[in-house]
Image (cartoon, helix red, strand yellow):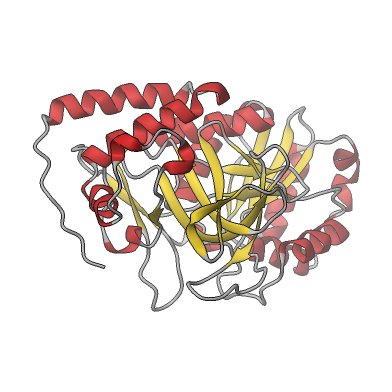
Amino acid sequence: MKFEIKGMQENPEMVELQIKALKRRVLEVKDTDFEELAIEIFKFQARHNPIYQSFLRMLDCSVDSVRSMDQIPFMPIELFKTFQVQTGFSPVLFNFESSGTTGQIPAKHAVCDPGFYQLNSLNAFNQLFGSITDYHIFALLPSYLERNTSSLVFMMDHFIQESKSEFSGFFLNQYAELLSQIQEALKTNRKIWVMGVTFGLLDWIDSGQEFLFWKEAIHEGRIMVMETGGMKGRREEWIRDRIHAYMMQHMGLKGVASEYGMTELFSQAYSFSDGIFVPSNTMRVLLREVNDPFSLVKTPGKIGGIKVIDLANVESCSFIETRDLGSLEEDGIRFKVLGRFDNSEMRGCSLMVSEPY
């Protein structure tokens, strides 16, 4: 796929002022004005993002004729691996980078305004789970901590700082220390949030640690264990239901929360315990037919390819065609993630959806 990238002739200062105004609106967006803002950002990015603009040109898309979210073309997520996808002229301070596997080209997401990413992510958590200061945060993220380009580590580091908890922190495989810290934290009035990459949580269970100590806290609703997917080649791949059943059995949990996010997105969606994801205010999921990227799936429960509108991607691209499979709930907002597919076939229901962070 070749792109003809034309230079932008706009006044950079004017474009940056428009981006700042869009960011303010993104942080305040409501359900009732989501579509209007999405269309406005689409037209802005169609004008000021060379990669997206070239993609639209290849589709012969008439930008001015787009009047609903259903009509917006979604850019293939693979382009984050081969191009710097940027809207506007701000300096790129650093890149978030996906982990991938050996031999794969990592996806890169340019970060021009890390404070905006942090604020948007914190707003999403507070919206769904309450104030971050109500939690002690224990981040069990061994594979991510080994990289300094992980958006998940960047987000969790901000959450840990904002929690203002003496117990919050990152852990690799110090399982005994982790349990000891949680036991001390349970003596306070805060809740406990354990955020872990899936293989790290399973390794914690298999290390022989006992979890009876938090049985009362679980009964009181003070424990939240959240997995963010990913075996990273460390363990056999399991489907999400098997993962959650194993964790509930061995950790005494009533349910396991999940997070849906990736390098290419600045917004997140969360599942409380039932595998149904609730997107943040700045995020919406549409579904495409498996065999037709331009036909949308509207029937609740029907499997389709996940398209993500992420308004927080103001300075990259807000309209991403992922490689994930999912289904929508009756409300058309909440969704399930059911696996992945390639250009020709469905690969089954793997927990490894996309390349998380």
**64 is higher (above) or lower (below) than 170:** above
Rendering coords of residue 148 (x, y %):
39, 55
What residue sits 47% from the left and 32% below the top? 120
**67 or 116, which is in the foreground?**
67
**296 or 12, which is in the foreground?**
296
Figure disc tally: 0
**227 or 34, which is in the foreground?**
34
Residue 70 visible, this orientation: yes
Rendering coords of residue 167 (x, y %):
64, 39
What residue sits 73% from the left and 42% below the top? 272
**164 is higher (above) or lower (below) than 95:** above
Rendering coords of residue 117 (x, y %):
42, 36
What residue sits 83% from the left and 36% below the top? 221
What residue sits 28% from the left and 28% below the top? 19
Rendering coords of residue 25 (x, y %):
41, 22
Quarter holding the N terminus is bottom left
Left or right, 81 with respect to 32, comes to: left
Q: Quadrant of residue 198?
A: bottom right
Left or right, 93 with respect to 247, comes to: left
Q: Quadrant of residue 224?
A: top right
Residue 355 visible, this orientation: no
